[in-house]
Image (tube, rainbow, N blue to C red):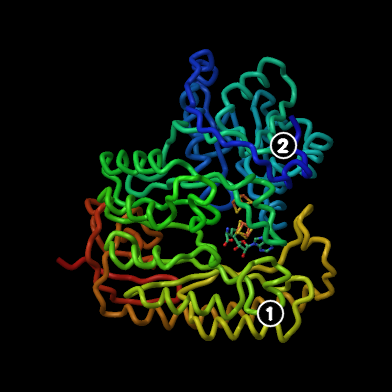
Amino acid sequence: MLPNLNEARKRTNNIVNTIKYVKDSKYSNIGVGKKYYIKTYGCQMNVHDSENIKALLEEMGFSEVYRMEDADLILLNTCAIRENAHNKVFGFLGRVKHLKEEKTSIITGICGCMAQEESVVNEIKDKYKWVDIVFGTHNISELPKILSDSIKNNKQAIEVLSVEGDIVEDIPVKRDSNYKAWVNIMYGCDKFCTYCIVPYTRGKQRSRSPKDIINEVKNLVKDGYSEVTLLGQNVNAYGKDLSLNYYMGDLLKDVAETGIPRVRFVTSHPWDFTDDMIDIIKKYDNVMPYIHLPLQSGSNRILKLMGRRYTKESYLELFNKLKTIPNVSITTDIIVGFPGETEEDFNETLDVVNTCKYDSAFTFIFSPRIGTPAAKMKDDISLEIKNERLQRLNDLVNKYANINNQKYLGKTVSVLIEDKSNKEGYLMGYTDTMKLVNVKCDQKYLGKIVNVKITDVKTWSLTGEIVK
Ligand code: SAH
Ligand code: SF4
Ligand code: F3S
């Protein structure tokens, strides 16, 4: 089945059922003795989808390799959010093609958000006939069947549902970390910000049932995990599509009460942030004082064109409320060069950055996405001006990131040590406020939450040593 933009745009009243994935043993031998390589682009949602895909492949007998050249199956889990994400995938496909020419038995596949795009799949059908399988974000649990069919029929298999189907529970997962875990709480997005492709690639908002989420977290606690990040495009809207009278504040509370040492959540759309959530964050020490609160623009005129549903004033009001959470760190996303953005509009964005003094920000140049309303808006700002605005914005963001980090010098903070650092003799982890810290310590601290005294500060990282 091929993706269809008009179908993807629709919001149906279909009742969302929850079904359970059941392993079908008829696919169990397909991958025995074979190796897979998966490359993941995009957000945490995709990273977590890849964790499911890996486990599905391993159920079929495949084992993972980390060099594409060693693989019998190469999968690209793609992102469609901006043009450069899209170009990176097509660039990488060129390399995959070379390999496939040398070793024709390699199976190649594309999944993720680009697979949901009608225009992309048409291109793959026409110009990339050697790609064996394409499957969408709503078809992950069908991977064993899709793969098996493609091998049997020896022709390109495309399986992309445009309209979201059921929520599938119990898909196996091979987590990248033994210490921190991604937990989906909802799928899709109904906000339809005018620039954004996500509502088309991920379907309508569907919240998982509270029971399934809490059980997953309880099992993670049992398995020794120290941190969960609750994932959704819009976590604050959790539960609004269920009729349980149970919302994000309730979920945060119940997840906190599982006793997992650290709870995080991304992303928070400013529109749905309730006072109840703020109270819960303040009340529970294991809900981390870190909030990602995308601004996108500081100009009310542009915010309206973006369909963001808040004004500069209401954003700042929320921001100030969040600042009453002790020790909170707040980060954001900003787009420059939205169609028609004037120098005055841009200055309003700088103005908000000067007011909020973010801990950090992801900044982007507007990228028109096929099928979205903003892609049709008149865009007469030159790339030169967009680049220049991005530069000015980044300079300001970096300034405040550095000022915020300086406050940590000499302080003792708690860090979950999670991996090796790029720095020789150091491991790395994050503070409760999501600051990256390189810690001089022994491997035995991996997976532990430790107290670290900060001895050096840079704009994007801290350095420190363990104190008792
Ligand atoms: N659901 C999140 C955003 C997910 S996408 C939210 O609403 O906050 C991550 C970020 O990518 C967005 O916050 C936005 O800043 C950026 N982005 C999305 N679409 C874009 C586009 N077409 N061009 C440039 N940046 C974009
Ligand atoms: Fe995109 Fe807006 Fe939904 Fe975020 S809230 S995923 S920016 S449409
Ligand atoms: Fe990209 Fe899809 Fe995530 S477009 S940002 S991978 S939801």
Residue linked to disc 2:
97
Could you tell me the amino acid type at mark 1?
A: Arg
Residue 408 screen position, x and y as percent:
32, 78
Q: Nearer the viewer, residue 229 or 108?
A: 229
Q: How busy is the neighbourhood of tag 1: few (under 14 within 10 Å), some, or many (20 plus)?
A: some
Could you tell me the amino acid type at mark 2?
A: Lys
| Left or right relative to 195: residue 359 | left
Q: Kindly identify the residue that appears in the image at 66 percent across and 34 percent down.
A: 135
Image-quarter location of ligand 1? bottom right
For label 1, being within 8 Å of ligand 1 is answered no
| Left or right relative to 191: residue 22 | left
The residue tagged with tag 2: helix, strand or loop? helix
Instruction: Please tell me whether residue 422 is drawn above or below residue 446 in the rendered image.
Output: below
The residue tagged with tag 1: helix, strand or loop? helix
Calculate the distance from the C-alpha at mark 1 to the C-alpha at mark 2: 38 Å
Residue linked to disc 1:
389
Q: Kindly identify the residue that appears in the image at 52 percent across and 40 percent down.
A: 50
| Left or right relative to 216: residue 387 | right
Residue 131 screen position, x and y as percent:
72, 32
For label 2, being within 8 Å of ligand 3 is answered no
